[in-house]
Amino acid sequence: MQAAKPLVITQGDPAGIGPEIIVKAFRDAPEALRHCFVVGNVATLRRAAQCVADSSGLQIPVARLGSVQDALHAPMRCVPVLELPGLASDVPWGQITEAGGHAAAECVVWAARAALNGEVAAMCTAPLHKEALSLAGVSFPGHTELLQAEAAQFAGTSIAQMPVRMMLANDELRTVLVSIHMSLRDAIEAVTFDNVLQTLRITHVALTKALGRAPRIGVAGLNPHAGEGGLFGREEIEIIAPAIAAAQAEGIDARGPFAPDTVYMRARNTPQQLGEFDVVIAMYHDQGLIPVKYLGVDKGVNVTLGLPLVRTSPDHGTAFDIAGKGIADADSLIESILVAKKLADFSVAI
């Protein structure tokens, strides 16, 4: 990562575990958090530091930054915060609120614009709550769509001309989704030739940069047994296979469609065996995220592909049920920061 540009971490919903896992990350992984800072509310981070101190006995200092560049000189095991005006500091733990959604969204927008303007090298987002986001009047259902809109506006283009995809990755699996946050009924309708081919193209470009070579892409079918030759649905024959063939004609190493209940076993990397694929294309959200999350959320990282900026996040949510108790695990956030730093200079594969 360029030493002259820090990495920004958004505080997430103040009612969730985001602020406390941020504090734990600065405490437990000081080298990984060098040249990082938080955009958010100082009082929110100090409340989180107190709840973490209650369980560990060690108080983590939270410092207010005067500028982005000050983050490069912040002492280790101190949480440097660039404070945004107008953010609520007294949102109750574990509650869905308009104030919490507003605070989370404002931090994401600020970080996205800073990244697009070249003020920061990359951004890592702590979890927000989609219902709180909606209460705050945000018309986008999550981080990915909000960042897509900001990038499109920055580029002076339409959202449709700024296609993005969600990739979830850990040490054993990577998956990229054709559709993201929509109902299952709508997700099935989103399995079109253009969407599948676009997903293959975005995945190929992004992972070629990250891996330093063309990725081996396995494609899951939509239906059980990948349609069983048309017995259980014809999407594989009429949509997915033609999109794979078109991608292959462009030089993309894509294969399938394969039965969705076995393709992830073929792609999984273990100490005993290298996976057959570098990444699996999933047709909808849960088809892709369940197998990756089943392997453990502590090392999972969410990466947004297709943006003109680097954005990662942990692969878990706000966990309102344990927020404020000081017991949330920061490992996925730490891993997300490490991946963001690697992707910022494309020197190390994820």
Image (tube, rainbow, N blue to C red):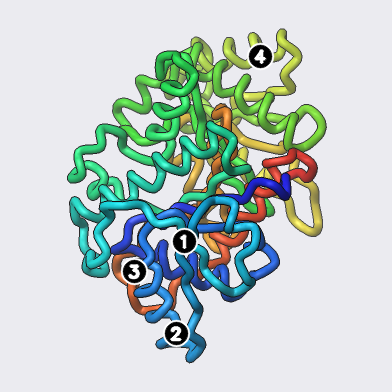
Corner quadrant of residue 217: top right
Q: Residue at x 31, y 37 (%)?
A: 141
Query: Which label's residue is closer to the chain start, 2 or 1?
Result: 2
Query: Which label's residue is closer to the chain start, 4 or 1?
Result: 1
In this figure, which residue is indicated by the disc labeled 3?
43
* Amino acid beneath label 1: Val
Query: Which label's residue is closer to the chain start, 2 or 3?
Result: 3
In this figure, which residue is indicated by the disc labeled 2?
53
Frontmost of labels 4 and 2 is 2
Q: Residue at x 53, y 32 (%)?
A: 116
Decide: is 31 above or below 240: below
Q: Kindly report the distance in space between the C-alpha atoms of the residues bearing marks 4 and 3.
A: 50 Å
* Amino acid beneath label 4: Ala
Q: Kindly report the distance in space between the C-alpha atoms of the residues bearing marks 4 and 2.
A: 52 Å
Q: Nearer the viewer, residue 155 or 254?
A: 155
Decide: is 283 above or below 9: above
Q: Residue at x 68, y 42 (%)?
A: 343
Q: Is residue 267 in sight in this rendering?
A: yes
In this figure, which residue is indicated by the disc labeled 1?
81
Answer whether labels 4 and 3 touch (C-beta < 8 Å).
Answer: no
Query: Which label's residue is closer to the chain start, 4 or 2?
Result: 2
Corner quadrant of residue 308: top right
In this figure, which residue is indicated by the disc labeled 4?
247
- Residue 103 left/right relative to 74: left
